[in-house]
């Protein structure tokens, strides 16, 4: 390739990247401005607030590490919801799949050596804990998938129901059979998992662990799977038009179960990575609400892996920086929810942003979900 | 059209440049400035429950001139406990209050990491259960605990003496939180102490997540209704807003209501007319007192490392003063004195077996 | 919904009641248990029914609404705020304050729905996004305002807990007197007293039941309903015969929002006189499930809500009668196990008996001319 052509190529790439990032960036900016006005109206200082928010999320190594810690489960769970959307399914059950994955990972982490009666090499133990946690999530999601495919049970109802079942089940497990027998323990939690079942941290003294790297790798793999493989193509086709998919000879029922299982696998990984990389046990009250945040993250990331990673980091930095913001200004953290809602609003309804800043539309509207579909 | 944008921009700028009304923090690293920070459990500072009571303790310390500066951070996720504590510690705070038994481990870790800072852990038992061995105690950490079972016992006894139907009820948050469980079982034990024949309904809201069990007043009201339908004529609500729902519902249906934590005659004005008493655990004075002790400890006095027992009692009868017979009042005082002296114990273990 | 489904749902509810009666009969008269469970079932089902009706109006017109939760939560807050403001600051009488609060709740629900409608219909944003935005915003706005208005010193209530004007009063339907007038035996009087209480319900509970009937009538017996359904099934065909698709969708979504608003008002103006952040506790999502469960019909949604209500009543009663549970059924003493019942039942009913539910054909799709 001639140097000039290379230059043109990069210029084009840059300008297209800029163009596609412009609206989301302006959306974030606009949401922050509105959030700032809200803060000012109640007598807070928006500049201090945003300085705190940025300091607390990107200000130093520790802050960056904590942002990555927050982002890790978000990426997995966001990918989970995205894959289901790609397959034309609405998985509101990431929350339950995550919990089930976390419980399983914890069980494998603390109990497996005892069951087998042997020392398990660290690398195998941690892979088993993470992997089986993911599989547990896959199983938990495959049930509503199968009910949808073979019995016509609606996945929205069934995933919501499975959330509550998972919740009651984990409460039961953590409170009786799996409860930490340590006499000083008063919480509903499992014992600590074995050293060998833990994901190592990336840097000494910081909490960010290999789970974050794993999340990025998995995001890449999801992209390859959905866009570059036959199965991925089938999932997308079923998601876009099940009738056409049937006509094209795709096994629609199998594909529905598969989409849900993969979605659940990713959500389960979110849970097992939290257990093996961060908490080293599962405890009631930990890792709650990610399943619902994940819906917003998937939609904000336009159900594309790259978008999901960026959206996760954005949400993570806001949740993480909120501590420092509150420390500096005593503003209620709920203002973060307001800003997050507005960001989603403006990114989704880019018409508003394009109107305010006079940006011409490129006229491509991506269909993300198909409502309840068939 | 463009003018509109100029105006909007100007408005936004003016709004942003508005001077901050919040006073700025003093330099907490200075030796003569006493800064007290508080980290909540997952939950809000305005929860009308333990977070708020503890925060009022900090504010009282400031009003009393003990503390120069008080500040809180609300935890939004359990994994942030350590980070939030460190935020205060790194800023040079002198005393850090952490609220809720979930923070027990992270508070102890932080106390070891920051030996020059005094830590107060509300509802955090050091070495469960009631360890007499104090050699393991961390020198700069005091767990502020309350005998909730005594408070529950007292109102349970009161309920058993006041019931006409022989049936009383208690609507509680999840039994997975030891203080809640001790309130509920103490209530049962207190009623049985007065009259084993009294039927006691104790219902825990443990079928939902931790984030929902204390914020479900509608469920509390529905549960209180069921109890009243079945003949209960005294309802004790012990579980944040879930319990509050039960208490207000009891008052609406005209039976006796018993509050929890603070004197809810004041915090639940809707139920005041039927508010018989409240099982009180005095978090606010306990926190304020410990902050004062920590301040003295900085100057060299002793710090009560290990467990520090706060007070639990029952609230006055207020509007129902005349409805409570004199012999019941006397009996209550007698039981209270016996519990204090240790002559009478509730028999409730510190944690659900 | 055909009669078989109703029969099955009725059977499930009877089964739940029977379990409690069997367990509790040692301690309480069956008639009292049944009456008490009926009252709980109807009360618990109320916000679910209204939420499901909210979804129904939206989705019958072709707009998916997963923002029911957010609409209920914000209506609960602003309804309560309106009532307290009128009562405490403007010194209006309690009843007037409550009614104004009710109007505030309806308006809040309607406004949230208007936002959803604008996003989904005019801007053609993915309808799931509109609902998600509403859910997130509702949590943020209510939490933030609740703090600023009621907690911070210097707020309009000075940081004190304001005295709420109470709750909407019970409407007495004289069933008890009617039965008692023909009574001769003591049992009969017991029945009269027990069931008299079931009919002593409050306004929002009663209107929820009336709204189920009205919605059924409107959707299936009127021109308006026919048009709404046409817009949800075949918007293009509807457009061709001169129905204003956009207008029909807007109006139905806003009506739906007001239903959710009434459901929100139930929490703070009728059930308990206070607002708590996150107090709807996921009931908007259960309502969504109830609507789909009921196959997008008002009576179906109501029946589904009653199943959830009955299961909740079961869960409460099993704990109340915990000491009467026979030893061989000890598993039922575990509240987590009993807590699983409604959800497992729902899944079984859905897959085993009811089978495929059919959503309106154009549900979730923006209409473009």
Image: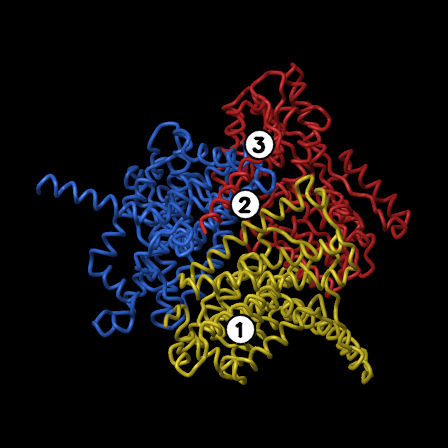
Tell me the chain of label 1: C
Left or right of residue C166, residue C288 in this image: left
Q: Are marks 1 and 2 in contact (CB under 8 Å)?
A: no
The residue singled out by tag 3 in the image is B127
Image quadrant where one finds the C terminus of chain C: bottom left
Per the model, the C-alpha gap separating discs 1 and 2 is 33 Å
Q: Colour of chain B?
A: red
Chain coloured blue in the rendered structure: A
Q: Nearer the viewer, mark 3 or mark 1?
A: 1
The residue singled out by tag 1 in the image is C301
Per the model, the C-alpha gap separating discs 3 and 1 is 52 Å
Q: Nearer the viewer, mark 1 or mark 2?
A: 2
Q: Is residue C366 visible?
A: yes
Residue B42 percent coordinates (x, y) = 55, 42
Q: Colour of chain C?
A: yellow
Residue A120 percent coordinates (x, y) = 30, 39
Q: Is residue B192 visible?
A: no
Q: Nearer the viewer, mark 3 or mark 2?
A: 2
The residue singled out by tag 2 in the image is A334
Left or right of residue C8, residue C39 in this image: right
- Residue C135's label in the rendered image is none
């Amino acid at each position: 390739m001639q140097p000039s052509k290379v230059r043109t190529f990069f210029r084009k790439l840059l300008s297209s990247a800029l163009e596609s990032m412009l609206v989301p960036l302006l959306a974030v900016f606009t949401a922050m401005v509105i959030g700032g006005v809200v803060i000012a109206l109640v007598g807070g200082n928006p500049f201090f607030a945003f300085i705190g928010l940025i300091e607390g999320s990107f200000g130093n190594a520790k802050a960056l590490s904590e942002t990555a810690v927050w982002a890790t489960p978000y990426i997995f769970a966001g990918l989970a919801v995205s894959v289901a959307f790609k397959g034309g399914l609405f998985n509101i059950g990431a929350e339950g799949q995550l919990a089930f994955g976390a419980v399983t990972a914890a069980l494998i982490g603390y109990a497996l050596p005892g069951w087998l009666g042997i020392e398990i090499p660290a690398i195998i133990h941690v892979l088993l804990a993470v992997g089986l946690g993911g599989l547990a999530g896959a199983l938990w999601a495959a049930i509503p998938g199968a009910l949808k495919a073979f019995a016509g049970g609606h996945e929205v109802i069934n995933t919501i129901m499975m959330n509550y079942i998972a919740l009651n089940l984990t409460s039961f497990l953590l409170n009786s059979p799996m409860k930490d027998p340590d006499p000083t323990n008063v919480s509903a939690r499992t014992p600590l998992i074995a050293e060998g079942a833990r994901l190592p941290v990336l840097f000494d003294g910081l909490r960010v662990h290999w789970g974050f790297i794993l999340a990025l790798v998995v995001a890449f793999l999801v992209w390859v799977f959905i866009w570059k493989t036959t199965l991925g193509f089938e999932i997308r086709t079923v998601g876009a038009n099940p009738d056409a998919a049937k006509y094209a000879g795709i096994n629609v029922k199998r594909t529905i179960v598969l989409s849900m299982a993969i979605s659940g696998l990713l959500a389960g990984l979110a849970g097992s990575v939290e257990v093996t990389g961060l908490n080293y046990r599962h405890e009631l009250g930990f890792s709650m609400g990610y399943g619902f945040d994940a819906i917003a993250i998937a939609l904000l990331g336009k159900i594309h892996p790259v978008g999901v990673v960026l959206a996760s980091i954005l949400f993570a930095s806001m949740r993480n920086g909120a501590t420092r913001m509150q420390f500096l200004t005593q503003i209620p953290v709920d203002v973060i929810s307001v800003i997050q809602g507005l960001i989603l609003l403006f990114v989704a309804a880019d018409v508003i942003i394009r109107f305010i800043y006079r940006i011409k539309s490129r006229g491509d509207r991506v269909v993300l979900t198909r409502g309840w579909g068939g | 059209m463009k003018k509109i944008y100029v105006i909007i921009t100007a408005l936004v700028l003016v709004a942003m440049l508005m001077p901050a009304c919040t006073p700025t923090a003093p330099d907490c690293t200075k030796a003569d400035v006493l800064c007290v920070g508080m980290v909540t459990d997952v939950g809000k500072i305005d929860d009308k429950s333990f977070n708020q009571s503890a925060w009022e303790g900090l504010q009282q310390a400031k009003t009393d001139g003990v503390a120069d500066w008080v500040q809180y951070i609300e935890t939004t996720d359990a994994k942030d406990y350590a980070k939030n504590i460190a935020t205060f510690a790194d800023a040079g705070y002198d005393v850090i209050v952490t609220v809720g038994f979930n923070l027990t481990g992270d508070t102890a870790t932080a106390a070891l990491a920051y030996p020059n800072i005094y830590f107060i852990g509300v509802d955090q038992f050091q070495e469960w259960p009631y360890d007499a061995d104090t050699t393991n105690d961390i020198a700069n950490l005091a767990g502020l605990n309350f005998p909730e079972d005594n408070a529950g016992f007292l109102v349970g006894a009161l309920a058993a003496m006041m019931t006409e139907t022989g049936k009383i009820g208690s609507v509680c948050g999840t039994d997975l939180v030891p203080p809640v469980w001790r309130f509920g079982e103490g209530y049962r034990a207190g009623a049985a102490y007065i009259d084993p024949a009294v039927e006691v309904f104790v219902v825990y809201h443990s079928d939902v997540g931790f984030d929902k069990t204390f914020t479900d007043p509608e469920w509390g009201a529905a549960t209180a209704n069921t109890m009243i339908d079945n003949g209960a004529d005294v309802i004790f609500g012990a579980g944040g807003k879930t319990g509050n729902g039960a208490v207000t519902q009891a008052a609406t249906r005209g039976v006796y209501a018993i509050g929890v934590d603070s004197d809810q005659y004041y915090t639940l004005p809707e139920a005041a007319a039927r508010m018989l008493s409240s099982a009180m655990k005095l978090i606010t004075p306990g926190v304020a007192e410990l902050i004062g002790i920590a301040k003295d400890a900085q100057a060299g006095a002793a710090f009560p490392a290990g467990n520090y027992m706060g007070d639990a009692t029952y609230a006055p009868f207020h509007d129902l003063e005349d409805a409570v017979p004199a012999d019941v009042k006397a009996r209550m005082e007698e039981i209270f004195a016996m519990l204090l002296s240790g002559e009478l114990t509730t028999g409730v273990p510190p944690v659900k077996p | 919904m055909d009669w078989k489904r109703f029969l099955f749902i009725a059977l499930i509810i009877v089964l739940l009641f029977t379990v409690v009666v069997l367990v509790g009969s040692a301690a309480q008269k069956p008639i009292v248990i049944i009456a008490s469970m009926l009252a709980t079932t109807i009360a618990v089902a109320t916000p679910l029914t209204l939420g499901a009706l909210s979804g129904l109006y939206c989705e019958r017109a072709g707009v998916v609404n997963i923002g029911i939760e957010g609409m209920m939560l914000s209506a609960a807050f602003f309804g309560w705020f309106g009532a307290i403001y009128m009562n405490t600051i403007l010194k209006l009488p309690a009843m007037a304050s409550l009614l104004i609060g009710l109007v505030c709740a309806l308006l809040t629900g309607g406004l949230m729905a208007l936002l959803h409608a604008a996003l989904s219909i005019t801007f053609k944003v993915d309808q799931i996004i509109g609902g998600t935005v509403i859910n997130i915003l509702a949590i943020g706005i209510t939490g933030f305002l609740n703090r600023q208005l009621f907690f911070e010193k210097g707020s309009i209530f000075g940081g004190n807990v304001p005295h709420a004007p109470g709750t909407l009063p019970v409407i007495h339907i004289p069933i008890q007197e009617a039965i008692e007038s023909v009574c001769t035996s003591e049992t009969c009087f017991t029945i009269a007293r027990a069931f008299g209480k079931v009919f002593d319900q409050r306004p929002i509970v009663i209107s929820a039941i009336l709204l189920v009937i009205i919605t059924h009538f409107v959707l299936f017996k009127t021109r308006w309903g026919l048009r709404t359904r046409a817009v949800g099934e075949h918007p293009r065909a509807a457009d061709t015969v001169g129905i204003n698709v956009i207008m029909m969708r807007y109006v139905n979504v806003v009506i739906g929002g007001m239903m959710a608003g009434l459901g929100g008002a139930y929490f703070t103006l009728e059930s308990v006189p206070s607002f708590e952040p996150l107090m709807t506790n996921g009931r908007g999502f259960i309502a969504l499930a109830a609507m789909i469960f009921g196959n997008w019909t008002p009576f179906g949604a109501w029946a589904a809500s009653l199943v959830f209500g009955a299961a909740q009543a079961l869960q409460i009663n099993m704990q109340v009668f915990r000491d009467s549970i026979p030893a061989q059924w000890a598993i039922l003493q575990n509240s987590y196990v009993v807590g699983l019942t409604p959800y497992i039942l729902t899944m079984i009913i859905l897959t085993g008996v009811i089978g495929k539910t059919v959503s309106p054909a154009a549900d979730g799709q923006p209409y473009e001319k």
